[in-house]
Image: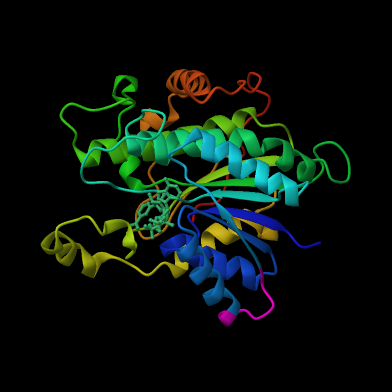
Amino acid sequence: MRKTVVITGGNSGIGLSMAHELARMGATVCLACRDQGKAAAARDEILQRTPGAQVELYKLDLSSFAAIHAFVQAFAQRHDRLDALINNAGAVPIRQQFTQDGFELQFGGNYLGPFLLTHLLLPLLQVAADEGGPGQGDARIVHLSSIAHNLGRIELDTAKGRKPYRVLPAYAQSKLGNLMFSHTLARKLPAGITSQAMHPGGVASPIYRELPRWQYALMRPFLIGPERPGKLAAELAIGAQRRGENGGYFSIQHPRIVSSTAKDLALQEALYKQSCVWADVEPLPEQVRTRQAVKPA
Ligand SMILES: NC(=O)c1ccc[n+]([C@@H]2O[C@H](COP(=O)([O-])OP(=O)(O)OC[C@H]3O[C@@H](n4cnc5c(N)ncnc54)[C@H](OP(=O)(O)O)[C@@H]3O)[C@@H](O)[C@H]2O)c1
């Protein structure tokens, strides 16, 4: 059966690379993007490289709770199940900006938006998870975190703004949030749905477009192309060899180090509970399963 995969921000960089790979693997690739022009260009590129690929375009702006609800409604009108969600979209604004709901943009768009999106898509993931009997199926969530999570601290009082705003602590907190959410889901999700996170390496992509030119020029020699992380994300999402793996953190190019903060269960729980309040979602029940050891990548 053809797998259905949602990629947020699949029009560019690592997201586009995983879209190519998933199309090659025969999945229905759903690009959830804020810019429909860029999304259409990405679809054309995918179809050129993989003729006959199934590619669907959706409008999704993760910096608006209303837009996230609208996306899930539109998606559910076309699909009654979802095999994999890849929370890929992310941004690094140099100046402080805010989401439509009043959160600092990196916290709100990189972390809290995907948090809400994931909760809203769980019923469709559950359908895939229950195929063949309760919990016997295979549904997966993949989160694009970063090695930068190691620099992050969870400071809930910065969620609605930082004074002063510095780009790196804000980015690092959002990527730490992604990893902690992945770990929390891995403990709480019912059988049949798994949650994994990855650092894609330092990747040459438009995410660095707001950096001063000289700074990007210094970094550029150390950046890799988006192909390897794209392949890994696609494999984590639907690869048969990854079936059942849960709670892992993978890293390309750099050491696979999970910070002690990311492993702090009490902090994971505090962040989770507060995020449920902010995103206005029902918390998942208390721990239902343990994480399984996974191979490093
Ligand atoms: N590149 C790296 O070195 C690196 C390292 C570690 C982690 N990561 C993570 O990898 C992920 C992908 O990054 P990338 O390097 O591929 O960057 P990218 O090429 O800039 O792609 C990011 C994607 O996210 C989309 N996006 C940003 N904000 C959004 C929002 N509010 N709503 C919907 N879509 C939004 C962008 O849309 P537009 O095209 O419209 O801007 C774009 O499609 C990010 O989560 C990033 O944090 C990247």
Residue 215, image quadrant: bottom left
Left or right of 88, for residue 52: right
* Residue 196 included in the magenta stretch of the image: no
Please identify the quadrant where the N terminus is shown. Answer: bottom right
What's the residue at 68%, 24% (across, down)? 288
The residue furthest right is 132
| Boundaries of the magenta span | 48-54
What's the residue at 63%, 42% (across, down)? 72
Residue 169: image location, x then y, percent: 24, 36
Q: How is the image coloured?
A: rainbow
Regarding ligand 1, which quadrant of the image does it lie in? bottom left
Residue 277: image location, x then y, percent: 51, 18
What's the residue at 27%, 27% (across, down)? 161
Q: Is residue 261 visible?
A: yes
What's the residue at 30%, 29% (across, down)? 153
Residue 182: image location, x then y, percent: 52, 37
Near-viewer residue (17 or 164): 164
